[in-house]
Image (tube, rainbow, N blue to C red):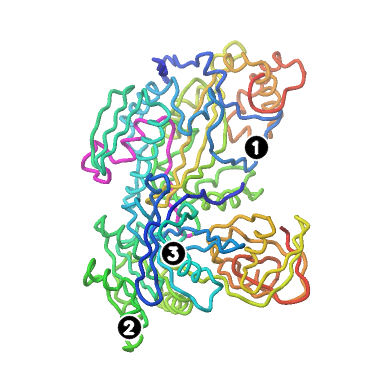
Amino acid sequence: MGITFRKETFRNDFTFKNSPEHIRRFPFPFHEDSYMYAVNIEPHVVGPKGSVLENLIDVDEHYVAEMQDRALVLAEDPLRCQSLPHMTLAGWDLLELLMEQQALGYPEHFTLTRDGDRWRWINRPLGIDDTFTFGDVSTLPYGPMEYITRQSQGDFCILDQRDGNLWMDAGMVTTQADWSLDFDIGMNFFEWHAPVPLAHEKGIFTRALKFLTNIQQGKPARRLNWTMTINPRLDTSPENYHKWGPDRTTVTPENVGEKVHLRVELQSFWRLPRSNGIVFPIRCYLIKMDELVTQPKWARRLHRVIRDLPEELANYKGLTRYRPTLVEWLSKLDDGSPTSPGFGPD
Amino acid sequence: MSTGTTKLDVVVSDVVPVNELVTRFHFRRRDGELLPTFSGGAHVVVEMRDGGRTRLNPYSLMGSPLDTREYTISVRRDDAGRGGSLFMHRSVKPGLEMVISYPVNLFSLDLRAKKHLMLAGGIGITPFMAQTAQLAAEGGNFELHYTCRTATLGTYADVLRERYDRRVRLYHDDRDERIELDRLLSSQPLGTHLYVCGPSGMIDWVRDHAASLGWPAETVHFEHFAAPQPGAPFDVTLALSGKTIRVGEQQSLLEAIEAAGVDPPYLCRGGVCGQCETNVISHDGKFIHNDHWLSEEEHRSCGKIMPCVSRFEGRSLVLER
């Protein structure tokens, strides 16, 4: 039994929504009633059936629509996908990883057959059946990273590791929370994290870098990050700020449930075997407030988290303008009763 | 945030004497599957069950990263060492089941380089065996300068010359042949990266020359393959686990900690990766720091020790383990 892929949009008429099963599997990021940064990294191992961690690379009902949205973004702005010349080998590493994981997790939708370096890749949801030579870029319609990330949900940053640092030297970034690959390309770990408030003072990036440069093959790690987005728009890039920035002025008490979305990123970190680089998939999950509050525990907890969020974080995440409206709306769903421990719904 | 590597169950598929000091070992997976892909410069940690004790020694993978049916390592017999190489030479035979770690690369190629200039000394040739195979397959530009004591001890010199011809230059100590380092480093095209693996003295010599000739530090890569040195036994108190242990003459501090049932993280076991860094709570005596991880100031301040390679002499040592 395969996934039923939804026909939906992430722009213009915004028809995106989650099915009831997908609401329950949403990776709610708050394990307690408040939020502050922590180095919340854990081993990326398979989680419970029916969760977004059931497979290490998750494919869900939004797959086809997300890939169509990515193609639209790339057609308008090809610089969302860039790979510096020394990163081609890492691109092949990523192609292997994503083909293996998608074929392993979803055999009814994806099939990978290998005969030496002669590979055949079947992607049924997107109607692709290609045979190519692994390692030979002339046998694919795009470079290896672009080819496979046009067929994989989430953004992908490939980091080169050298001089005790990580360098953002390749990526496919079209579903980002207000950052730009074109701006960050070639930067090191500290440079591209420079705008993040509070975390530098806590020494978080120094510790995180130490951890990431020691990620080992066969032992990926993960963390959750979150923000909020008005309308279910995947492409909230600085390049298109003029399109989505003004949306934040449109939130009213009447439309909070439909317009305001919690945006959660499942970030994972994998050592790439041939290039010794690190790939950093950033998988974005969206849920509108109307869907989220169908789980009373999440409604109560989100109310408390947003209400008590430090000012700097609210500013950095771009919530300032509509935070009072959102908190007021959520407060009606918070009777003050305790929430159970852990992330999941009751 | 524990780190470390996944283990691989392997069987020794072949043991091949290469010359009077070096023997090559081949490993395959016990389940018949392919081994994980790796990158040139990677090592694995081999677990040796030697009587009652477990030795964990790192060795560079020297096969082609393109062929993962088997891994190969080359072990130089060290008669004055702590016994790991002797165990490999004497006790490891084809058919023996062993456990090795996933590959870890702490001596990676910089793929931005327009040219890779490699300097090897003695058994330091092994990571370059894999790196040259990787680069040759991609049409990469490399040049290898390899010094060995004598022609018969020039491990794989013949293989390398046959594979890469004039891209390999050999130097024999017994014929007084020396790398003309100043000339070599002064005549490289822009965008060259330098790699050196060999005895400590050679690494220092090359790094010092490169620095004095203005090579940026980011273009100079090196791998120490120093094994832990034996030394006088000493006692250590592990404060967190409430244990007092004795570190034997032929044992490293890390091995003694592990033998007591405490498992600090590790990757290289050679004093370079920083994983097993341990805080010193108190001490009365002298540290023998052998690592390349802590700064000179950290060595002087006696606040930390790298138990994989460093030792202690004195009355008491209490560690935060």
According to the picture, the residue beneath numbered tag 2 turns out to be B172
How many marks do you count on the picture?
3
Same-chain check, marks 2 and 1 = no
Question: Is A77 located above or below residue B303 in the figure?
Answer: above
Q: CA distance from mark 1 to mark 3?
A: 36 Å
Towards the viewer: A227 or B53: B53
**What type is the residue that disc 3 sits on?**
Glu
The residue stretch that appears in magenta: A134-163
Residue at image x 50%, y 20%?
A231
* Sequence-wise first label, 3 or 2: 2
Disc 1 crowd, CA 10 A, few/some/many (<14, 14-19, 20+) = few
Binning the other alpha carbons within 10 Å of mark 3 as few (below 14), some (14 to 19) or many (20 upward) gives few
What residue would you read off at disc 3? Answer: B218
Image: B170 above or below A338: below
Q: How far across and how far down the image is residue B267, in percent?
A: 54, 57
Label 3: chain letter: B
The C terminus of chain B lies in quadrant: bottom right
Label 2 residue SS: strand
Q: Callout 2: residue from which chain?
A: B
Mark 1 and mark 3 residues within 8 Å of each other at the beta carbon: no
Q: Are marks 3 and 2 on the same chain?
A: yes
Disc number placed over residue A312 in the picture, else none: 1
Quadrant position of residue B316: bottom right
Q: Please, what is the three-letter code of the amino acid marked with disc 1?
A: Glu
Amino acid type of the residue that numbered disc 2 sits on in the rendered structure: His
Label 3 to label 2: alpha-carbon separation: 30 Å
Q: Residue at x 53, y 38 (%)?
A: A44
